[in-house]
Amino acid sequence: MNSPPPTKLRQATKTFVNNSGLLLLGTIIALVWANLQRESYVALSHYLHFAVNDIGMAFFFALAAKEVAEATAPGGALHSPRQAAMPLAAAIGGMLGPGLIFVALTIWLDRPNLERGWAIPTATDIAFSYLAARLIFGTKHPAIPFLLLLAIADDALGLLIIAAFYPTGPLRLIEFAVLLGAAMLFARWLQKRRVASFWPYILGAGVISWIGFHRGGLHPALALVPIVPFLPHAGRDPGLFVDAPNAHDTLNEFEHWFKRPVDVLLFFFGLVNAGVVLGNFGAGTWFVLISILAGKPIGIVSATAVAALAGLRLPSHVTWRDITIVGIIAGIGFTVALFFATAAFPYGRLLDETKMGALLSFSAFFIGLGAARVLKVRRID
């Protein structure tokens, strides 16, 4: 029996959820609540912070790691060194540019208390950047896969930054190494025995890894990242962030099961992390905003140009005007920038200032839209 066709309301709801609408809704509620009832909002944020940021976000980063694992597997979009080199160079430039500008601002204006926030403007929010790219370029423009490859590489590098520069407590590296090693060996054992269910990987190896990160002083939201590559997957990549409903390998089953829960999680992430008093603008706000709006396009265009001079080629039919727009909209940091801010600073004024900069990075979309019209970037639908 065929299921009835989806109603317009159902289609609209699905579109809203698929385009990070729940994250935006949580963000709006947090902003309104924090500005009307600051004390009750802070109490809620403190109460939910550990569950959302340290446990729930492990599944958000696991889905990001899933895309990295598929893209770098044989046949994936990043498997060939030549294919991966250009977007990887662009991603590195897109992180170095904002990071260096942020550090330069802290030195020039003598604000050493903000130095820990250097990674905040290096982030790119894949979901919102992808949405902006589709609105600006159309759905079939070759610049969109380039942006997604860049964003995946940015995410992978961002995970390394969180692990290396933002410990959550005293480092216990031996304890971390022992527990993580045990988790990975267990995941490998499951893989060799061809265990098809993702649950033993998550509830077995994943829990051991989470304890290792937590006990080792590293951010436990990264706990599933080293486990995800062990989940068995088909020897093909259906495409970057392409939903493959008919793919029933373990890795895709994991994504199918957790995609909607992670969408709901992002509502709570916005609710817990985005509540900033609108009057709490400060140096941290402008440092983050200037660094990301200027540093992303400068870094991405410069690194891409250096890669081209070294003999690499731009994707077919992608122009330098397109790369400029990609650089601008890659400056939408939002989710990952908020996460970096909470990792860099404790509750207080500096956290509020830098969070405000992360939220305002959404302005990169409007700048990109205007720049695309000025540069007469063509749409391909």
Image (cartoon, rainbow, N blue to C red):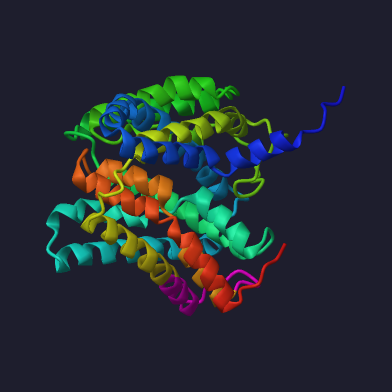
Query: Within the magenta stretch, is there residue 316?
Result: yes
Query: Which residue is drawn at the image coordinates 82% and 26% (left, top)?
Result: 3
Q: Nearer the viewer, residue 259 or 90?
A: 259
Query: Quadrant of the image for the C terminus?
Result: bottom right
Residue 50 on image: x %, y %:
31, 27
Residue 287 on image: x %, y %:
26, 60
Tell me if 9 is positioned left or right of 259 in this view: right
Range drawn in magenta: 301-318
Tell me if 325 is positioned left or right of 340 in this view: right
Tell me if 193 is positioned left or right of 353 in this view: right
Query: Quadrant of the image for the N terminus?
Result: top right
Query: Within the magenta stretch, is there residue 349?
Result: no
Tell me if 209 is positioned left or right of 202 in this view: left
Residue 134: which quarter of the image? Answer: bottom right
Query: Which residue is drawn at the image coordinates 58% and 59% (left, top)?
Result: 133
The answer to whether 23 is drawn above or below residue 256 in the figure is: below
Extreme residue in the front direction: 36
Residue 76 on image: x %, y %:
60, 50
Query: Which residue is drawn at the image coordinates 69% and 60% (left, top)?
Result: 140
Residue 349 in view of the camera: yes
Residue 8: which quarter of the image? Answer: top right
Residue 78 in view of the camera: no
Q: Nearer the viewer, residue 296 or 164?
A: 296
